[in-house]
Image (cartoon, rainbow, N blue to C red):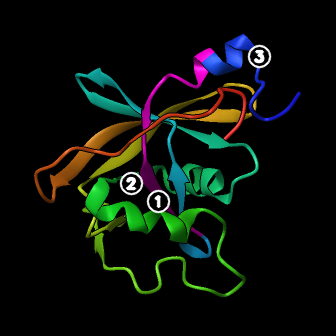
């Protein structure tokens, strides 16, 4: 099957929109981040987000270790931030090199030029196949400027 000939379920799942975010956590080796699109608010009281993290990601271990993470919400003006987080940085490289960051009240890192950031304290997790859904109670946040977030659609719902 070619890339454009995805099964009907994959094509349907690909039409479920998601945002684009830089999810950050501080682990043993320092701050780290990844480009995430599986992020959603799932509760109002208390305000709660869920972030899906691949089992093999060091970020998951950092979230478990510190019990916290931050989400930087991207918009068209901050779209260029994604490139730095597509892949893990080279050994010894600063994943935030050249980027302006802010420290959240609990010491997480967020991107100063994003549309907004939200800090979360981990409250639960659930294994969901190839990812772990990490639930976080939103404890702090800032809208850096007015605007609309980036929205992403996949070609199919079976892969990135």
Residue 88 in the image, given as x and y percentages of width and height: 66, 68
- Label 3, on which residue? 7
- The answer to whether the residues at label 3 and label 2 have Cβ atoms under 8 Å apart is no
Could you tell me how far apart the alpha carbons at marks 3 and 2 are, in whole angstroms? 35 Å
Who is closer to the viewer here, 22 or 106?
A: 22
Q: Quadrant of residue 100?
A: bottom left
Q: Callout 1: few (<14), some (14-19), or many (20+) C-alpha neighbours within 10 Å? A: many
In-image side of 94 versus 142 (left or right):
right
Q: Is residue 15 magenta?
A: yes
Q: Residue at x 40, y 31 (%)?
A: 40
Q: Nearer the viewer, mark 3 or mark 2?
A: 3
Q: Residue at x 36, y 46 (%)?
A: 120
Say which label, 1 or 3, has the lower sequence index.
Answer: 3
- The answer to whether the residues at label 1 and label 2 have Cβ atoms under 8 Å apart is yes
For the N terminus, the quadrant is top right
- Residue furthest out toward the left: 146
Q: Residue at x 65, y 20 (%)?
A: 11
Residue 70: which disc?
2
Residue 96 in the image, given as x and y percentages of width and height: 47, 78
- Label 1, on which residue? 24
- The answer to whether the residues at label 1 and label 3 have Cβ atoms under 8 Å apart is no
Q: Residue at x 49, y 22 (%)?
A: 16
Q: Is residue 68 magenta?
A: no
- Residue furthest out toward the right: 1
Start-end of magenta stretch: 12-27
Could you tell me how far apart the alpha carbons at marks 1 and 3 are, in whole angstroms? 34 Å
Say which label, 3 or 2, has the lower sequence index.
Answer: 3
């Amino acid at each position: 099957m070619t890339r454009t000939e995805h099964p009907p379920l994959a094509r349907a799942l690909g039409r479920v929109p998601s945002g684009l975010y830089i999810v950050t956590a501080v682990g043993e080796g320092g701050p780290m981040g990844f480009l995430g699109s599986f992020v959603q608010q799932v509760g109002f009281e208390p305000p709660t987000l869920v972030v899906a993290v691949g089992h093999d990601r060091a970020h998951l271990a950092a979230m478990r270790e510190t019990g916290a993470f931050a989400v930087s919400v991207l918009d068209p003006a901050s779209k260029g931030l994604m490139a730095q987080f597509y892949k893990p940085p080279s050994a010894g490289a600063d994943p935030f090199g050249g980027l302006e960051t802010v420290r959240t009240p609990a010491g997480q890192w967020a991107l100063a030029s994003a549309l907004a950031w939200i800090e979360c304290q981990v409250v639960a997790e659930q294994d969901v196949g190839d990812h772990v859904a990490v639930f976080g109670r939103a404890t702090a946040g800032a809208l850096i400027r007015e605007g609309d977030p980036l929205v992403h659609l996949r070609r199919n719902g079976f892969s990135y």
